[in-house]
C-alpha cells in the first residue's frame, strides 16, 4: 500500500478547534484532538471543503510557486479552462494565453483543447461493446479517490481514460520534443494552472501505476494578479487559442456530459450531491443511463477552492466567451474508430475501503457489534464535543482504540451524576 501525498493541510497556529470543518468534511476525515483539527490522511480526498468553510483560514492547499518552473529551459503552461472565467470583460481567450507567455512561458497548451479530444474519444468509448454502464467520469480526482475509498463496487464503471490535464501534458511535451529536438526531455517543464487542490494531489500521486506528466502545479489564485498585470500590457494578443465551446464548457458542471451528444446522462456537482448519486448508483436506484458526470465542487471546476471568482459569475462569463466560438476545434475525422493507447490508464487505482474495520471477517463483525452497542449508550446528538463528527464515528473511534468513551462529555456527565448519587446513598455528602 503506498501512502497518499495530500495537498490540504492545517495551519495549527490559526486553528481554534471550532469544529466547523469537522461538521463539513464529507469523508469524516477530521477529528478535533487537544483543541486542534487533525486530518486522517487515509480518509481525506483533498476536496477542499474544509478550506472553504474554515472561518479562521486555518486550512490551506499547498501548491507550487511559479518560480518552481525556473529549473526548466523550456516552460509550458497548461491553463485550466476555469482560468478564463476569472476576468471581467474578457472577450478573447488569447489575452490570457498571451499574458501567460509574457510571464515567462515559452508555450501554452490549453487543457480545453485536450478536453475536446477526450470528449471525442469518450463518444467512441461509450459505443464500445462490453463497457459497464453507467460510465462514471474520471475527470474529478476528488471523485475518483472517493470511489476508491467509499464505493469500490463502482470501480468498473469508471471511465478508463486520463483526464484532460494529463492528455494536455502529454501532447504538449510531444509537441515541444518535436519542435525543439535540441532539448533534453528533462529540460521541458509542464505547469498546470489549477482550480483545486485535488488536481495538485493527482499530480503528486498519479493514478494507480500511471505517473503524472505535469511537473509543477500553480493555483489560479496565486497567479491571478501577476496574470492580470501581464494581460493589461497586452495590446495585440498572439493567435494561440485552439479550442471551442466544448472544451471551455468542461469548466462547469454538465459541460463534459453535454459534449457527448447523448441525452442519457446525469451531471451532479457539490460533494454532498456526488455522494448521494454514488449511493443511489450503488443501490441500483437510478434509471438506466449511459454517462454520469460528477464534480466535487459546486458548479464544477469553476467552484474550485483555488479560484478567485464566485462560481456562478465565472460560469456566466464563460458562457459569454463561448458564444463567439465554434462548437469544437478538435473533432475527430469520421474514419477514426480507435482510441489511442495514450488516452487510457491501465491499472485500477488502489482500493482502500474506509468502511472496512479489519481484514478479518470475524474481527470486523465483532467490532461492528461493539460499535452498535456503544452507539446505543451514546446520546445520539452528534454534538461534536468529543472531537468526532457524529456519535457513530465516535463509537467507531472508541472501538478502534483512537478515542476513549469518557471523551463524550454527556456520558461523562451521566457517569458523574450516577457516582454522586451513589455517594449520597452511602451517606457521603460529596464535600
Ligand atoms: S474550521 Fe477546523 S481548521 Fe478551521 S479553526 Fe475550526 S477546527 Fe480549526
Ligand atoms: S480536504 Fe475534504 S476530505 Fe480532506 S479533510 Fe478537508 S473536507 Fe475532509
Image (tube, rainbow, N blue to C red):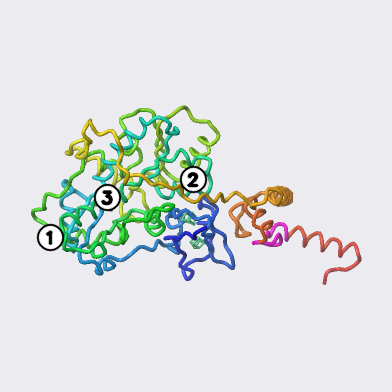
Instruction: Establish whether ligand 2 lies closer than 8 Å to the Cβ of label 1.
Output: no
Q: Which residue is found at the position 70% from the left and 47% from the top?
A: 365
Q: How far apart are the two marked residues, 2 and 1, measured between alpha carbons?
A: 45 Å
Q: For label 2, count other residues whose C-alpha is less than 10 Å away and answer few (under 14), some (14-19) or many (20+).
A: many
Secondary structure found at label 1:
loop
Secondary structure found at label 2:
helix
Secondary structure found at label 3:
helix
Q: How far apart are the two marked residues, 3 and 1, measured between alpha carbons?
A: 27 Å
Q: Which residue is found at the position 53% from the left and 31% from the top?
A: 284
For this rendering, which residue is in front, 224 or 131?
Answer: 131
Is label 2 in contact with label 1 (beta carbons under 8 Å)?
no
Closest to the camera, between mark 3 and mark 1, is 3
Q: For label 1, count other residues whose C-alpha is less than 10 Å away and answer few (under 14), some (14-19) or many (20+).
A: few
Label located before the other in sequence (2 or 1): 2
Residue under pointer 2: 147
Describe residue 334's horizontal placement relative to residue 347 as left or right: left
Which mark identifies residue 140? none
Find residue 377 and report its horizontal and vertical position in percent. 74, 51
Label located before the other in sequence (2 or 3): 2
* For residue 206, above or below residue 339: below
For the magenta stretch, what is the residue range? 402-412
* For residue 368, above or below residue 416: above
Which mark identifies residue 233? 1
Find residue 198 and report its horizontal and vertical position in percent. 40, 54
Residue under pointer 3: 168
Q: Which residue is found at the position 26% from the left and 68% from the top?
A: 67
**Dominant secondary structure of the residues highlighted in magenta in the image:** helix
> Magenta stretch containing residue 407, yes or no?
yes
Find residue 31 and report its horizontal and vertical position in percent. 57, 60
Q: How far apart are the two marked residues, 2 and 3, measured between alpha carbons?
A: 24 Å
Find residue 420 and report its horizontal and vertical position in percent. 82, 63
For this rendering, which residue is in front, 263 or 304?
Answer: 263
Amino acid at each position: 500500500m503506498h501512502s497518499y501525498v495530500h495537498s490540504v493541510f492545517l495551519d495549527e497556529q490559526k486553528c481554534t478547534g471550532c469544529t466547523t470543518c469537522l461538521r463539513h468534511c464529507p469523508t469524516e476525515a477530521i477529528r478535533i484532538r487537544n483543541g486542534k483539527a487533525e486530518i486522517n490522511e487515509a480518509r481525506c480526498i483533498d476536496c477542499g471543503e474544509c478550506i472553504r468553510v474554515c472561518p479562521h483560514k486555518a486550512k490551506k492547499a499547498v501548491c507550487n510557486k511559479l518560480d518552481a518552473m525556473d529549473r526548466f529551459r523550456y516552460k509550458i503552461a497548461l491553463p485550466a479552462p476555469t482560468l478564463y472565467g476569472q476576468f471581467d470583460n474578457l472577450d478573447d481567450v488569447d489575452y490570457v494565453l498571451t499574458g501567460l507567455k509574457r510571464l515567462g512561458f515559452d508555450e501554452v497548451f490549453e487543457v480545453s483543447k485536450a478536453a475536446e479530444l477526450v470528449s471525442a474519444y469518450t463518444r467512441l468509448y461509450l459505443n464500445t461493446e462490453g463497457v459497464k454502464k453507467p460510465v462514471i467520469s474520471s475527470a474529478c480526482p476528488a471523485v475518483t479517490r472517493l470511489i476508491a475509498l467509499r464505493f469500490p463496487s463502482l470501480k468498473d464503471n469508471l471511465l478508463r481514460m486520463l483526464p484532460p490535464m494529463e492528455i494536455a501534458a502529454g501532447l504538449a511535451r510531444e509537441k515541444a520534443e518535436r519542435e525543439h529536438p535540441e532539448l533534453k526531455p528533462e529540460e521541458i517543464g509542464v505547469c498546470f494552472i489549477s482550480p483545486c487542490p485535488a488536481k495538485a494531489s493527482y499530480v503528486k500521486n498519479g493514478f494507480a501505476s500511471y505517473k503524472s506528466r505535469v511537473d509543477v502545479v500553480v493555483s489560479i489564485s496565486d497567479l491571478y494578479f501577476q496574470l492580470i498585470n501581464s494581460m493589461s500590457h497586452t495590446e495585440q494578443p498572439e493567435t494561440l487559442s485552439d479550442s471551442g465551446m466544448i472544451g471551455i464548457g468542461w469548466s462547469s458542471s454538465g459541460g463534459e456530459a453535454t459534449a457527448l451528444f447523448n441525452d442519457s446522462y446525469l451531471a451532479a456537482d457539490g460533494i454532498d450531491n456526488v455522494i448521494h448519486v454514488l449511493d443511489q448508483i450503488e443501490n441500483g436506484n437510478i434509471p438506466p443511463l449511459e454517462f454520469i458526470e460528477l464534480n466535487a465542487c459546486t458548479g464544477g471546476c469553476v467552484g474550485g477552492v483555488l479560484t478567485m471568482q464566485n462560481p456562478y459569475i465565472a460560469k456566466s462569463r464563460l458562457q459569454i466567451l463561448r458564444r463567439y466560438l465554434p462548437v469544437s476545434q478538435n473533432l475527430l475525422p469520421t474514419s477514426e474508430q480507435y482510441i489511442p493507447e495514450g488516452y487510457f490508464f491501465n491499472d485500477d487505482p488502489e482500493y482502500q475501503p474506509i468502511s472496512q474495520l479489519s481484514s478479518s471477517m470475524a474481527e470486523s463483525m465483532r467490532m461492528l457489534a461493539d460499535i452498535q452497542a456503544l452507539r446505543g449508550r451514546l446520546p445520539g446528538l452528534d454534538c461534536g464535543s468529543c472531537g468526532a463528527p457524529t456519535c457513530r464515528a465516535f463509537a467507531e473511534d472508541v472501538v478502534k482504540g483512537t478515542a476513549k468513551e469518557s471523551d463524550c462529555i454527556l456520558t461523562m456527565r451521566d457517569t458523574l451524576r450516577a457516582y454522586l448519587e451513589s455517594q449520597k446513598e452511602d451517606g457521603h455528602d460529596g464535600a
